[in-house]
Amino acid sequence: MKRFSYLKAFCSPFKRPKLKWYFGKIAIGTPYFFPRRTIKDLDKPGYLKFVPKKIGFNFVGLGWKTKWTPTDYRFEWSPVWSFVFFGKQIAVIFRAPEQDHYWEAWLYYMYNTTGTRKERIAKCKEDFPLKYTRYSKDGERSVNYYDLILKTKYR
């Protein structure tokens, strides 16, 4: 199922995403709005309106898009599983290290590479480099994000 394809990251050369748990009043969006459902608008026949969910589940997939080219991936939001029960929410948020770089590289790995895991990672590093220069008060520093997002065996 494409909607849950991000779960493949747990068995990939990429570090496992951490699960962040939330318990409390409804506060985690799915993704842009709090959990809600659609009902018929009785005041305007033929129209629909949104109302907050009283009880229910939401499974939000990885939010991403391509920008200028078919391989120019952009991360938008993390996957979330949410359960709502009368104003309270239990949510599991899938947090990856260096989220933007992690999910964009993982998408490239999934959709634009073939071969063994090591060959696919080599292709990622060649065609989808993650080498950046960070600037701060202390000066500049070069960072290769593959060192931060890949399991040690694949660096």
Image: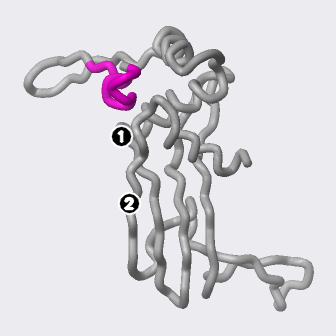
Give the camera-side residue of 151 and 131: 151
Question: Which kind of residue does numbered mark 1 sit on?
Answer: Pro
Classify mark 1: residues with Cα within 10 Å, few (<14), some (14-19) or many (20+). some
Give the camera-side residue of 53 and 51: 53
Residue 134 vs 58, above or below: the answer is above
Image check: 78 left or right of 35?
A: left
Q: Secondary structure at mark 2?
A: strand
Q: Position of residue 87 (x, y in %)?
A: 50, 87
120 is within the stretch colored magenta:
no
Classify mark 2: residues with Cα within 10 Å, few (<14), some (14-19) or many (20+). few
Q: Which residue is mark 2?
A: 20
Outermost right residue: 46
Question: Which kind of residue does numbered mark 2 sit on?
Answer: Lys
Q: Position of residue 60 (x, y in %)?
A: 60, 58
Q: Position of residue 90 (x, y in %)?
A: 47, 75
Image check: 62 left or right of 44?
A: left
Q: Which residue is mark 1?
A: 97
Give the camera-side residue of 64 and 80: 80
Q: Position of residue 120 (x, y in %)?
A: 56, 17
Q: Residue at x 52, y 66 (%)?
A: 29
Q: Residue at x 58, y 17 (%)?
A: 116
In three-dimensional space, the C-alpha distance between marks 2 and 1, rounded to whole angstroms, equals 12 Å
Location of the C terminus by quadrant is top left
Q: Hey, which quadrant is residue 144 in on the image?
A: top left
Q: Which residues are magenta?
A: 143-154
